[in-house]
Amino acid sequence: QVQPVESGGGSVQGGGSLTLSCAASGYSYMAWFRQTPGQRREVSEVVAGINDRGTARYADSVKGRFTISQDNTKNTLYLQMNNLKPEDTAMYYCAADRRNIGFWTSGSAWSLPSRYRDWGQGTQVTVSA
């Protein structure tokens, strides 16, 4: 089984943009999480998620700034990040799962790291003031 592979991180000034990519296929739902140094995966902050029907969900902290999308022809998940802020600085992880998550559009299950079995190695995003 191939794990997700992230790319596209980097350093930008506040107000700038970055696009993260994640190579993955065959999953029921996928999401981007972020971790700050010393933070365990179990308490990672969800950023955005999307299911195999294309329904997206976002953390309140990134609504209106980040957009999650997927290109099934390229087996790639994207996270377009605009108007970046220093508090967005973190290691960003692509997470995915093949199980049925139930109600994707309601409740908080989509935001729980424990709901995702497969994780990439992460890509660093650093935003300077």
Image (cartoon, rainbow, N blue to C red):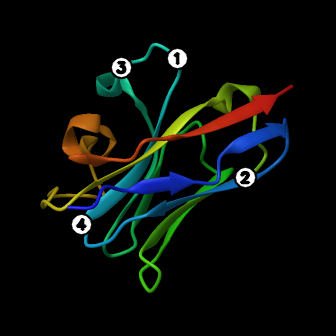
* Up-down relation of residue 127 to residue 105 (above or below): above
Residue at 28% across, 37% down: 112
**CA gap, disc 3 and disc 4:** 24 Å
CB within 8 Å, label 2 to label 1: no
Q: Which residue is mark 1?
A: 37
Pointer 1 or 4: first along the chain = 4
Residue drawn where x is 39% and y is 47% of the image: 120
Furthest-front residue in view? 2
Amino acid under label 1? Answer: Pro
Q: CA distance from mark 2 to mark 3?
A: 24 Å
Query: Upstream in the sequence, badge 2 or badge 3?
Result: 2
* Quarter of the image with the C terminus in it: top right
Q: Position of residue 76 (x, y in %)?
A: 47, 70
Against 52, residue 88 (above or below) is above
Give the residue type that dot 4 points to: Ser
Residue holding disc 2? 18
Image position, residue 122 (x, y; %): 48, 41
Residue that numbered label 3 is attached to: 40
Mark 1, secondary structure of its residue? loop
Helix, strand or loop at disc 2?
Answer: strand
Q: Residue at x 72, y 52 (%)?
A: 18
Percent of width and height locating residue 15:
85, 42
- Callout 1 crowding tier (Cα within 10 Å): few <14, some 14–19, many ≥20: few
> What distance separates the C-alpha of mark 1 from that of mark 4?
29 Å
- Packing grade of label 3 (10 A; few <14, some 14-19, many >=20) is few
**Dot 2: within a 10 Å radius of its alpha carbon, few (fewer than 14), some, or many (20 or more) residues?**
some
The answer to whether the residues at label 4 and label 2 have Cβ atoms under 8 Å apart is no
Q: Earlier in the sequence, mark 4 or mark 2?
A: 2
Quadrant of the image occupied by residue 93: top left
